[in-house]
Amino acid sequence: MREEQLLEMIERYLSGEMTKEERAKFETLRSSDASVAEKLAEHKNFTALIKQYSERLNLETRLNAIHEEIDVHTLKDDLMSHPSIVVQMWRNHHSKISVAASIAIFAILCTLFFTGYLTNQDPRFVQLKQEVDRVKVQQKRLGDKTDKIISDGKPGPAISAKFRGTGFALSGNGYIITNFHVISGGDSVYVQNSDGESFHTKVVYTEPQYDVAILQINDPAFKNLGQVPYTFKKFKSDLGEDVYTLGYPTDDISMGGPGALTALTGFRGDTTEYQVSIPLNPGNSGGPLVDGNGNIIGVVNGKQTQATGAAFAVKSNYLLKAIQNIPADSLNKSLNLNTKNALAGLSRPQQIKKMRNYVFMVKVYNQ
């Protein structure tokens, strides 16, 4: 397909001009071809920039029109002959007012910067990677636990992690799934199980466009976990389904939810994600999103800051596509997903007991 044809399809897709059948075919093409998905994301960003530029030009035009309507010279004469209270105040106290205004502007800029409005981050969406060195209490707890692991003769670095999130097993022989944004920028990555044992891992494969990273435990102290108890759902889930997650927003594994699947698209209509009504915290990124039958339907990756309980998860079928895209020479062990669900029919506490040994804290270090 020529690039001109692809761009025309993308424009029709984004503008809603496609029929239902055409849209379904394009979704299939996008799902099967990573380059198409990448081109779609680039085009969305480009059109957003064009829209911002157009809005800026419109604002400038309106301001110029207002300026032309004002008789500046007449206004000046009126103010000079009959100065208002504001003008008199400015004449008498302009130096003090200037200092106060400077302080106010500086405070506003600081507020905008730290809330994300002066960065590339959208303040309405936050990824749930936990930056431990900004949370002193949790950093100390993690450092104490790491020191205890070392003193007990268990593997793991002595320094405190810079970032941490959650991951869970794809198979019993050491393959772990987490978010790309959790491990991005780290020098080394460890995972820690619910018993406090840490294991060194290597990054096997990443797909940043889906925010997916696949790790492999390569630590001699690691023992095979056996068959994972859950399966990975290949098809879309339905609105209203009961869901929950497991993760490490604290030092101990904890459940998020129960909640519900509230939208089939994620932040800003992202079709690679679900929206769920689960209150989550930093550290939950990379955790499994589980339905009532014990199927993994997604990987938690963020939340909306302006809506309480609105969280997002990458759909499991994009995880499965990422696994299929792993180069064969990147795997030194077989990666076989479980096809038999051992959690179906169990109560939620029973499901969690079976799952907890397969969910890990992911600790990222810059050494």
Image (spheres, rainbow, N blue to C red):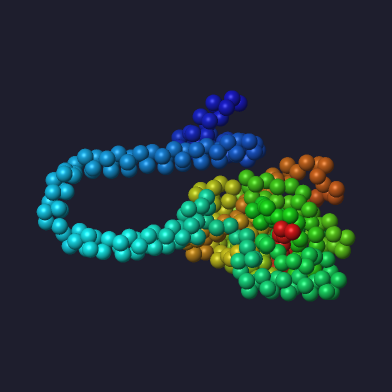
- Determine whether, in the image, residue 238 is placed left or right of residue 19: right
- Determine whether, in the image, residue 341 is placed left or right of residue 218: left
Question: In this orientation, does residue 350 appear?
Answer: no
Question: In this orientation, does residue 51 appear?
Answer: yes
Image point 14% across, 53% down: which residue? 80
- Determine whether, in the image, residue 303 is placed left or right of residue 51: right
Residue 117: percent from left, percent from top:
47, 54
Image point 45% across, 61% down: which residue? 111
Image point 72% across, 60% down: which residue? 365
Image point 11% across, 54% down: which residue? 81
Report the quarter where the N terminus lies. top right
Relative depth, front residue between 22 and 334: 334
- Determine whether, in the image, residue 343 is placed left or right of residue 27: right
Residue 224: percent from left, percent from top:
85, 61
User: Total of numbered circles in the picture?
Assistant: 0
Residue 41: percent from left, percent from top:
55, 40
From this viewpoint, which residue is outermost toward the right? Answer: 220
Residue 12: percent from left, percent from top:
48, 33
Relative depth, front residue between 105 and 330: 105
Relative depth, front residue between 159 and 152: 159
Report the quarter where the C terminus lies. bottom right
